[in-house]
Structures are given as C-alpha cells and as structure tokens.
Image: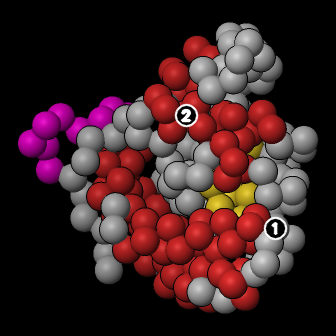
Amino acid sequence: MTYWDPMPTVRALVGEPHPLWRGDLVRHDWSGPAPDGWQGRDWRNVPGPFYTAGTDNCLTGRQCAPRHVAYEDEYRTEFVYRQPVQAYGVHELTCAAECDPFGGYGGDGDLHWTPELVGDWWRERGRAREWAARVGWGAWATSEHESLRDAAEGARTYLAHLDRGLRDYLRGYVFWLAEGRPAAPGERLPELDA
C-alpha cells in the first residue's frame, strides 16, 4: 500500500467551510500538536500523523468519524484507531476534532514516530487486541444505551483493523517516515516483525 499524506488536505480546510457541515468554517489547523502533547496521547492510537491526547468523554467522535475514532473504556475519551487514506477520512477526523471541546486531537505524529517506534508499537499490538476484544464483546455490547453499543462496535472495528489492513498501512507509513516520500508503485516496502 502506498502511503497517502493527509496534511495538505488538513491545511487546505483551515478557514474554509467544512465539507461535512453546512456553512461552518474549520477554525483550527489540525496538523499541529494536541494541547496535551504527544507524550499525553492514548496508547491505543495507531501510528500515523493523527492522534488524541486528552479529549472529552461525551462519546461524540464516532458521530463524525466512525471509521477512524473509538473510545477507551476508563474515561470514555477518544482515540484514532485508523488513519485516513483519502480526503473523506480527513474530513471525518477534522469534524471529530472540531467537535471536541478540549481540542484534544493532534496531527504532528510524523514528527514523533520513527520506523523503530512503529515497529515497537506493532510488536506490542497484542495489548491493543486484548483490550479491543474485552471491550468489544463486554458489557457495552449489550448495554441498553445506544451510544455504549456504538462504543463496543468501535472496539470491534479497531480489532478488525488490527487484524486486517493496519499492517499494510504501517508498511507504507514506515517507508514514508524513512524516505520522506511515498513508495512508488512496485517499490518494495519494509516488513514488520511479527
């Protein structure tokens, strides 16, 4: 999979009407750091430019970005479980970020991730799998509250992405980090350790 850089799309949205809204302008450049910083990010965030650190707990992120955002189960804060690979994904993530009253989203992950750190995260993904399986099939899955059932669905979708799709994305992302460009068609991508 060739890596797609979402940052030009993010920066082009600033001050413009958000594509998913009617008339409201994007007020913030989401390519910068989260207010709580890189060090405050949730460990469940998958490697890539976007991450969360200190979002609210109102369960709103999935209303905008169900294909990208899930909730952790202790405080119900948001995290990015899938990075965008096209403009529409950026639109969803910036919608979630704009709706978060704490502005707890960051887009400067490329400044912090290294090929080695991505490899470390991948090798330790079992922790994320165990968490997602427990939450996705736990009490939230049968809750009488629709928002909690949706939160369980987010955990199950995260688990599915960990098992199918994330590895290929990360191989392209590691190439991007190492070479400063996406891989050309047919160019060999780095392998990730099991």
Is there any visible trace of residue 170 in the rendered image? yes
Residue at left offset 47%, top offset 62%: 118
- Residue 118 vs 97, above or below: the answer is below
Front residue of 75/175: it is 75
Quadrant housing residue 4: top left
- Residue 76 vs 106, above or below: the answer is below
Residue at left offset 69%, top offset 72%: 149
Q: For numbered disc 1, what is the local secondary structure?
A: loop
Decide: few, some or many residues near mark 1? Use Cα within 10 Å; few <14, some 14-19, many ≥20: some
Residue at which label 2 appears: 90
Q: Position of residue 91 (x, y in %)?
A: 58, 31
Mark 1 vs 2, N-terminal side = 1
Q: Is residue 69 magenta?
A: no
Q: For numbered disc 2, what is the local secondary structure?
A: helix
Q: Position of residue 191 (x, y in %)?
A: 25, 64
Relative placement, left or right, of 170 versus 124 is: left
Residue at left offset 53%, top offset 74%: 156
Look at the image and tell me in which quarter the C terminus lies.
bottom left
Residue type at numbered disc 1: Arg
Decide: few, some or many residues near mark 2? Use Cα within 10 Å; few <14, some 14-19, many ≥20: many
Relative placement, left or right, of 150 versus 121 is: right
Q: Main secondary structure of the magenta part?
A: loop
Quadrant housing residue 171: bottom left
Residue at which label 1 appears: 76
- Residue 14 vs 75, above or below: the answer is above
Q: Which residues are magenta?
A: 180-188
Relative placement, left or right, of 117 versus 58 is: left
Residue type at numbered disc 2: Val
Q: Position of residue 161 (x, y in %)?
A: 43, 66
From this viewpoint, which residue is outermost toward the front?
Answer: 144
